[in-house]
Amino acid sequence: MNWMERVFKLSEHGTNVRTELVAGLTTFLTMAYIIFVNPSILGDAGMPKGAVFVATCLIAALGTTIMALYANYPIALAPGMGLNAYFAYVVVLHMGFTWQAALGAVFVSGCLFLLVTLFGLRELIIKGIPQSIRIAITVGIGLFLALIALKSAGIVAASPATFVTLGDLHKPEVILASLGFLIIVVLDRLKVPGAILIGIVVVTVASFFFAGNEFHGVFSAPPSIAPTFLQLDIKSALTGGILNVVLVFFLVELFDATGTLMGVAKRAGLLVPSRMGRFNRSLLADSGAIFAGSLLGTSSTTAYVESAAGVQAGGRTGLTALTVAALFLCCLFLSPLAGVVPGYATAPALFFVACLMLKELTEIEWGETTEAIPAAVTALLMPFTYSVANGLAFGFITYAVLKLFTGRSKEVHWMVWLIGGVFLFKFVYIGG
């Protein structure tokens, strides 16, 4: 135990081994759903689910271990919700790029992310983007996730007359997905650890009895990662058609990861002047995990807000994160279980996460239309154009134009003019 004290400085942080281990287990239970959800979503893009499952477990373990040993932070990393859906349903299925090219875009965005972190530009860029647009990005992705989740659950269906309509509520898949969502919300409200994971498991078990799903066992040797390992296509990712995808990955990674790290670290009492060096290390840890994940074969990796559950349970050091990493490695032997989880079992988890992302709406300054309207445009156009990039584009352009014609151009950071100008040039000379 002496090495734990030496590496993690437990007494200095007012904690002990037992508390850290319990905190790690708590964090793991709240985020373990990703080992089922990520292969399901990326599998829809044509990626081999077994290989994605292994990549998900490995990058979660690797990224979280780096966070534990390098930054000594109780924060876990894993492929992010939202960006995995954007990767699969927009970049690959809607825009028509191969999943290899999409992985290349993740790699390029990860390299950019690491560079801006190393050179101290991360804070500059964040300060340059208006608060209203930052909030709208989270809200818009939440709305986009909600649409995808409702479609996967069968609650929303296509309609030639109205574009979307209510699905067949008599199907067992729809009923099970609806019950799964209610279970997750109730358990979360009762503060039951692993509420999302429990909801997924309950629906999956019920699917064997009511929806014709077949059980293939629980344990086996991990599948091969070869089908996705180093399969990224960087050359295609650097072509003009996918550069806006790189920008979306980069901006969302920037705001989501930084916001999560700051929020959880603040809750743990780690954002104090004497410990800011460790925070900078945490920024490097999550930056490096993005392109490492693309090499393994998964969408963008990010810090998980569910880490706050472990902090609430007393986690204060990297021992909490190291516990999470070890548990993710153990999950490598659960691939048969992950393979039988149907899309309508993970849809409730997506919808629940989407609902939570909408709470950011309260932070928008609704009394100032030059702030509120661009935010609304950003958020609404993401689901309605089925593109996070389009929402960002119209949001930045609207923000710049409204500020310009209301005599408030001095309030606009040069970063907004630059991004808005790039998007406007794209629409005018290249197209949507």
Image (cartoon, grey):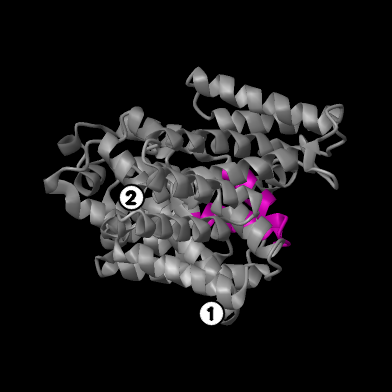
Residue drawn at the location 19% of the way across and 47% of the way down: 6
- Dividing the picture into quarters, in which one does residue 104 lie? bottom right
Picture coordinates of residue 222 (x, y %)?
64, 55
Q: Determine the secondary structure under disc 2.
A: helix
- In this image, 15 relative to 92: left or right? left
- Residue 346 - label: none
Could you say where residue 210 lies in the image, as x and y percent from the top left?
A: 85, 28
> Which residue appears at 58% of the width and 64% of the height?
297
Q: Which residue is mark 1?
A: 238
- Please tell me whether mark 2 or mark 1 is closer to you in this view: 1
Image quarter in which the N terminus is found: top left
Q: Nearer the viewer, residue 70 or 272?
A: 272
Q: Residue 160, image x and y in percent? A: 85, 47
Disc 1 residue type? Leu
Q: Which mark is residue 68?
A: 2
The residue under the point 50% across, 17% down is: 190
Magenta stretch holds residue 46: yes
Q: Residues within 10 Å of mark 2 (few under 14, many from 20)?
A: many
Front position in the image: 356 or 42? 356
Dot 2 or dot 1, earlier in sequence? 2
Q: Please provide the residue range marked out in magenta.
A: 34-59
Q: CA distance from mark 2 to mark 1?
A: 33 Å
